[in-house]
Image: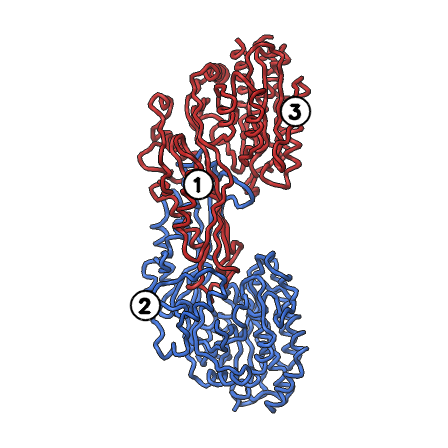
Chain colours: A blue, B red
Amino acid sequence: MSLDHALEEARAGRDAAEADLFEELRIPSVSTLPERRADVRRNCEWLDARFRALGFRTSITDVEAGGHPVLQADWTGAGDAPSLTIYGHYDVQPPDPVDEWTTPPFEPTLRDGMVYARGASDNKGNHMAALKAAEHALAAGGPPVNLRFLLEGEEEITGPSLPRYIRENASRLGTDHVLVWDGGFSPDGRPELVTGLRGILYVELEAKGPAVDLHSGGFGGNAPNPLNTLARILGELKGRDGRVTIPAFYDGIRMPDAGEMADWDRSDAFAETIRGLTGAAVLEGEGGYSAAERAWARPTLDVNGFVGGFTGEGKKTVIPARGSAKVSMRLVPGQDAMRILDSLREYVGELTTPGVSVEVRLLGAAPPVLAGADHVGATALASAFEAAFGRPAARLRTGGSIPVAIDFQEALGAPMMISGLAQPGAGAHSPNEHFSLDHYHRGIEALVRLMWSLGR
Amino acid sequence: MSLDHALEEARAGRDAAEADLFEELRIPSVSTLPERRADVRRNCEWLDARFRALGFRTSITDVEAGGHPVLQADWTGAGDAPSLTIYGHYDVQPPDPVDEWTTPPFEPTLRDGMVYARGASDNKGNHMAALKAAEHALAAGGPPVNLRFLLEGEEEITGPSLPRYIRENASRLGTDHVLVWDGGFSPDGRPELVTGLRGILYVELEAKGPAVDLHSGGFGGNAPNPLNTLARILGELKGRDGRVTIPAFYDGIRMPDAGEMADWDRSDAFAETIRGLTGAAVLEGEGGYSAAERAWARPTLDVNGFVGGFTGEGKKTVIPARGSAKVSMRLVPGQDAMRILDSLREYVGELTTPGVSVEVRLLGAAPPVLAGADHVGATALASAFEAAFGRPAARLRTGGSIPVAIDFQEALGAPMMISGLAQPGAGAHSPNEHFSLDHYHRGIEALVRLMWSLGR
């Protein structure tokens, strides 16, 4: 039971660790696509087999009909020592637009120290690093903490299975530390301890006008056009000043205090870093706030997609019967997703035109979460990061959502570490997603160190 | 050379006339789809063979590289008698959305006296009626007018081939009468003589923001979102009051005088007829004008399609790199398409946000046309309609565009009849396009009568 021995194992096992990651990345576990259903399950079973080979006791549980299973893997060899629960997800985003990938999304390819594949950074690189850390710790006689992995297949669809699993099994899932291991480094390249996550409210708007598609020559000027109306509504949801216009949207927001923002880089240089990652000419956002605040502590609204009418090559003079859009809002502490949904529905009803009916359908929601970053686990992880990466960890928030974090917090109550290994600009959710193998190997070391630190 | 004999031929030949129409409708001559290119040409050659079989002298001319050919078919057996030039087009709109068709778009199907197929009303039903009228007239010894057909394959893409052909060959295409035979009955079911056509300006807007698709969690609040910006622009191009906001858009418009509007039904009952055809809950349009004026004498703007970001099932939290929209404006006499295009480009440049560049690409344009309806040909056609359909013809305008009409008018100078046989609600450009066989057979009779009337 020696840390040094485990670290030696990690250093010796790098080729195998890379091969294992590549193997998992070949499984196209896209949770939102019905035709990938069997692949999602196959990924779960692939992980299950690996944990069992290490001596973990495992279970695969189908919680929701039509959902994807929860994988629980427990190693209790440390007896009365503290326990660490590690969260990750084995599902991935769709790879589209597929034709923008340089190499196929499910054929992991190494270029310049980066592995390119869908899921490389989100979340397979992260959870494989944790699995490998456990493997090396066990090869060195076992870590001084008990380990539990909870891996879900519905993160990218904000599915209900793991939240329900955690809440229904809370009494037997008691733990001393939770590591929500689904993140990455800060945009300026620092290891990151996340003190807060934005929540999300994701809706679909469907606008209907005429009963059938119409010729725009004969009917243009009289027929209600659901695309004109839907575009106007989408355009009015957020002003040119970056302010969301939904009534009561900003009600109750609590901004972080100066202490929480001590590590935040609120400079123009940081904004320029963000701009560089986007490749946009300039950034756009809410006036009066720094880029860091806009990313981590302010809510926003984005149209994630829209489609309607004729979208092929050439021209078609049609007034279409319908059009739709996907819209998501990122929420911060103090905001309530369901209250905002009610307000949005009422507002859209006011914004639409008399001949167009617009339905607002809820596709998913998750509340914002505050994690704190001064508890024992967070301090241990910060030290482990500094030892493995040679850089101090920054206490920051993150702009994304990890829906299940609120369930861990409310049902288990244990302090949370929220962090991960993805390098900035990893392209999670984008074509050419990639993950740094340097981060992967240093991350494995950091996790080994964390186990020994928590076990002291 | 007897009118009665020709009408007998028409009545005896109804089954064959239907079979011929069905045969042409089976050819999927979609001009905007590259994969249908060979079918478009096949349709042209199919018509060419039929004209040659009747004794016409024909030519198939490829005017533009990459375009679709012009078919000219001449019968000069009437010697020094006047000549009638009949215009039509053998290309059709795309059938999409294909899954909304009750029966396949290129398998013509008869239900309740209507033939359902793409192109049934626009324009194959019309030009086949003219071809059959010529056939019957020839079987009766030949009509007392010389006949020329000019059929194009680029009407639905506003292509340049036939306009160029007419202008370059104007000296040898001289004619006494032009019949632009690509229309239909009025919305309230009257045979129609068109006194004016709206023009069109069709553009595509492409909005670009980030260099790549981004995760909306990490970048939402900072990254410019081309979909939000494009939606806002589209929404602002036309106000809730139905007024287009492009600067100078309405400059120079000449409204029809009371004489031209004598046959127009400007009542609420007509608006209700239009509303019924759309299936919309209520109509939307420019305040202060009747539905007839809004359809025929006022310009408008419609979004014909938009697409961008994630449009599949479920959720994807993406800020997309780009989005695009197709927008068309219907223009009326006094408006200038190219001046409006310039103004639109400048306006879009003002409406966009700093991080989003929006390109406005011209996809097609045609000016509005005034045809007049008191010349000899129009009077003859009105009488022919009344004899064949038992209803007087109405002098109206039409809201659609027939781009080539301006070329006939400017290059050939002969007075134009603009009319056609499609019944109201024919679904041109929509799923389940259909055409009344009663209109088809009565239309053949009307055209036979027109030939004899013009030959007197």
B149 vs A365, left or right, is right
Chain letter of mark 3 equals B
Q: Residue at x 34, y 71 (%)?
A: A254
Other-residue count near label 1 (Cα within 10 Å), few / some / many at <14 / 14–19 / ≥20: many
The circle drawn on residue B59 is: 3
- Is residue A27 visible to us here? yes
Give the image location of residue A31, x and y in percent.
56, 63
Q: Is residue B427 above or below residue B317?
A: above
Q: Quadrant of residue B134?
A: top right
Q: Earlier in the sequence, mark 3 or mark 1?
A: 3
Q: What residue type is labelled 1?
A: Leu
Are marks 2 and 1 in one subunit?
Answer: no
The circle drawn on residue B341 is: 1
Q: Which residue is drawn at 67% across and 83% down?
A: A12
Local secondary structure at mark 3: strand
The circle drawn on residue A3 is: none
B343 vs A50, left or right, is left
Give the image location of residue A297, x and y in percent.
39, 70
Q: In which quarter of the image is residue A431?
A: bottom right
According to the picture, the residue beneath numbered tag 2 turns out to be: A252
Q: Is residue B404 above or below residue A120?
A: above
Give the image location of residue B413, x and y in percent.
49, 20
Q: Quadrant of residue B9?
A: top right
Q: Marks 3 and 1, how far apart in space?
A: 36 Å
